[in-house]
C-alpha cells in the first residue's frame, strides 16, 4: 500500500531524514518507533506532502506520490492525524466531523453514525466546542475526523502521547477496531509498549535513519536494540 524509498528531508538547510525507507502492506498496522526528535513526525509529514523530501520516492498503491500536495493525497485516500491534533476550537464536535466528510469510494464508508459507534464518548459531547475538550477527547476527535475522509491508509502521529493509562487502553481498542475494519495504519510512537501491542511490524528510527526493522515478535525479543534506540 505504501512504499517509502530512501527519502531525504530538510527543514531549510537542516538535513533531518537520511535515506528513510519503509513499507506498509495493505491491512497491516506498522509502527515507527523512536525517541523524541528521532524523525517520526518528519517522516509522516514527508509522506503527507507537508515537508516534501528532496530525494527519494514515495509510492501509494503503486502510484508515485512524491512531492504531491497534501490535499491531493487526502483525496487519494491518505488520512493524517497530526500529533498536535488541530481541532477547530470554535466548532462543535459534530461540526468538526461534518466538515471533514468525504464520500467513500467503496460501499462501507465512515459516516457520523459509524464514527459514534466506534467512539460513543464523542456522541455524548457532540455539541461541545472543540476548545472545551480534554486531551483524550481531542485525540479521539482528531482520529474520528480523519476517518470522516474515508482514508485507506491512516497516518497516526503519537496518538497516545500525554494520555492517562486508561485512555491509552481505550484508544488501543479503537485502533484495533480500525484494523479489523480493514484500514491500513502507519503509527508513529514513542510509547513502545502500546505500539507493539497494536502492530504487526515495526521500524526504529534514530537521528533520521532507520536503524532496525522486524516483526513485533522480533522487536519484543531484541532487548539490545530497544535499549540502544528507545531506552526501554
Ligand atoms: N520546523 C522545524 N524546523 C527545523 N527543525 C525541525 C523542525 N521540526 C523538527 N525539527 C527537527 O527535526 C528533527 C526531527 O524532528 P521530528 O520529526 O519532529 O521528531 P519526532 O517526531 O521523532 O520527535 C529534530 O531534531 C527536530 O529538532
Ligand atoms: Mg513527533
Image: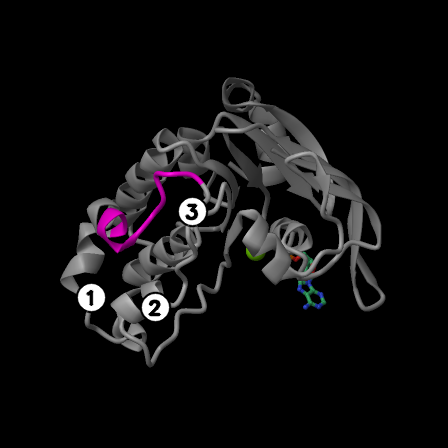
Label 2 – label 1 distance at C-alpha: 10 Å
Does residue 216 appear to the left or right of 91 in the view shown?
A: right
**Element type at mark 2:** helix
Q: Which residue is mark 2?
A: 96
Does residue 134 appear to the left or right of 14 in the view shown?
A: left
Examine the rendering and report whether any part of residue 198 can be seen: yes
Q: Is residue 69 above or below residue 119?
A: below
Numbered range of the magenta stretch: 106-115
Seen at 14% across and 61% down, the residue is: 124
Ligand 2: give its quadrant. bottom right
User: Is residue 107 inside the magenta stretch?
Assistant: yes
Q: Which residue is mark 1?
A: 126
Can you name the residue that lies furthest to the left here? 124
Seen at 68% across and 61% down, the residue is: 69
- Quarter occupied by the N terminus: top right
Which of the two discs, 1 and 3, labels the residue nearer the N terminus? 3
Seen at 18% across and 58% down, the residue is: 123
| Crowd around label 3: few <14 · some 14–19 · many ≥20 (10 Å) | some
Q: Which residue is mark 3?
A: 104
Amino acid at each position: 500500500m505504501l512504499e517509502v524509498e530512501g527519502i531525504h528531508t530538510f527543514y531549510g538547510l537542516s538535513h533531518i531524514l537520511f535515506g528513510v525507507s519503509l513499507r506498509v502492506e495493505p491491512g497491516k498496522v506498522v509502527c515507527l518507533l523512536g525517541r523524541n526528535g528521532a524523525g517520526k513526525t518528519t517522516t509522516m509529514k514527508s509522506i503527507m506532502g507537508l515537508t516534501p523530501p528532496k530525494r527519494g520516492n514515495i509510492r501509494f498503491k503503486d502510484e508515485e506520490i512524491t512531492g504531491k500536495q497534501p490535499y491531493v493525497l487526502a483525496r487519494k485516500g491518505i488520512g493524517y492525524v497530526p500529533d498536535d491534533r488541530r481541532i477547530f476550537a470554535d466548532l462543535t464536535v459534530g461540526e468538526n466531523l461534518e466538515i471533514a466528510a468525504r464520500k467513500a469510494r467503496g460501499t462501507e464508508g465512515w459516516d457520523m453514525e459509524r464514527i459514534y459507534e466506534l467512539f460513543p464518548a464523542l456522541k455524548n459531547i457532540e455539541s461541545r466546542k472543540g476548545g472545551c475538550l480534554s486531551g483524550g477527547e481531542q485525540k479521539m476527535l482528531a482520529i474520528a475526523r480523519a476517518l470522516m475522509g474515508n482514508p485507506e491508509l491512516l497516518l497516526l502521529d503519537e496518538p497516545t502521547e500525554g494520555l492517562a493509562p486508561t485512555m491509552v487502553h481505550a484508544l488501543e481498542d479503537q485502533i484495533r477496531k480500525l484494523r479489523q475494519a480493514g484500514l491500513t495504519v502507519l503509527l508513529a510512537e514513542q510509547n513502545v509498549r502500546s505500539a507493539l501491542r497494536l502492530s504487526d511490524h515495526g521500524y526504529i528510527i534514530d537521528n533520521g535513519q532507520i536503524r532496525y526493522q522486524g516483526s513485533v515478535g522480533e522487536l519484543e525479543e531484541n532487548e539490545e536494540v530497544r535499549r540502544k534506540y528507545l531506552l526501554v
